[in-house]
Image: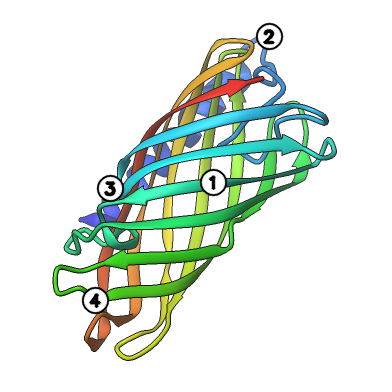
Amino acid sequence: MKRGIVSGLVVGMLLVSGAAMAQEGYGRGQGWSVLSGQTVGQGATVLNGQLGWPGISLGLLHGATSRFDIGGKFSFNYGREGIVTSVVPGIKLQAWMRLMLVQTSQVNVGLSFSPGPLFYFYDDNYTDVGLTLPLSLTLGLPVGSALMLNIGVDVPFYVIFGPGGGPVFPLLVGGGLEYFVARNLAIDFNVRMGPSIGTYYGYYRGGARFTLDATFGVSFHL
């Protein structure tokens, strides 16, 4: 059933984007994006906030070139790296880098990499300390001037140090959208879901745990 939901989401977004491409006036959004493969633009700075599961984040991106963004973000999570059965508070401090690989009037493709330390705090005064090395590949589909759709594959790999720790390999797929309320303001919704396989707190499980990342956000193009 989970596979059916993801497949339906992807097919639905492709149908919507295909219909939009056939219309006259098909454009490239507002020339910037945070969720798709498009960058924020050379010399531009964008402040982005996200709220949902597994937490809250605040990020800042700067367009170093027309194809490369660099910045950072801080996250407070109440779900351990998106695992839906693991409600644990934690924080992450990450660099944020985005590289646009392809840009046309109809599609954009980009890579994102956000390495940094993570910390999760348990009731028994035990703290997980680790390193997250998430990588994502995103396809962006501009629909007119006000809407940017995206379809992506995320691999938010992380490793927990110390006893009971180890590497965890999530594989998440999904989509989202950005709606440009104004040239410098966008609201968005983004969702990724899939399995996480690896070492969990206190014991090792060879199976997978369902993982979800679903957020609403706001971006200000400064």
Mark toward the start of the polypeptide (3 vs 4): 3
Neighbor class of circle 3 (other Cα within 10 Å; few <14, some 14-19, many 20+) is few
Mark toward the start of the polypeptide (3 vs 2): 3
* Amino acid marked by disc 1: Lys
- How much space separates mark 4 and mark 1, taking CA atoms? 25 Å
- How much space separates mark 2 and mark 4, taking CA atoms? 57 Å
- How much space separates mark 2 and mark 1, taking CA atoms? 35 Å
Mark 2 lies on residue: 25
- How much space separates mark 3 and mark 2, taking CA atoms? 31 Å
Where disc 1 sits, the SS reads strand
Where disc 2 sits, the SS reads loop
State the image coordinates of residue 198 (x, y, percent, origin top left). Answer: 35, 81
Please tell me the numbered disc located at residue 5: 3
State the image coordinates of residue 150 (x, y, percent, origin top left). Answer: 53, 37
Please tell me the numbered disc located at residue 205: none
Mark toward the start of the polypeptide (4 vs 1): 1
Residue lying furthest front: 125
Depth check, mark 2 against mark 4: the one in front is 4
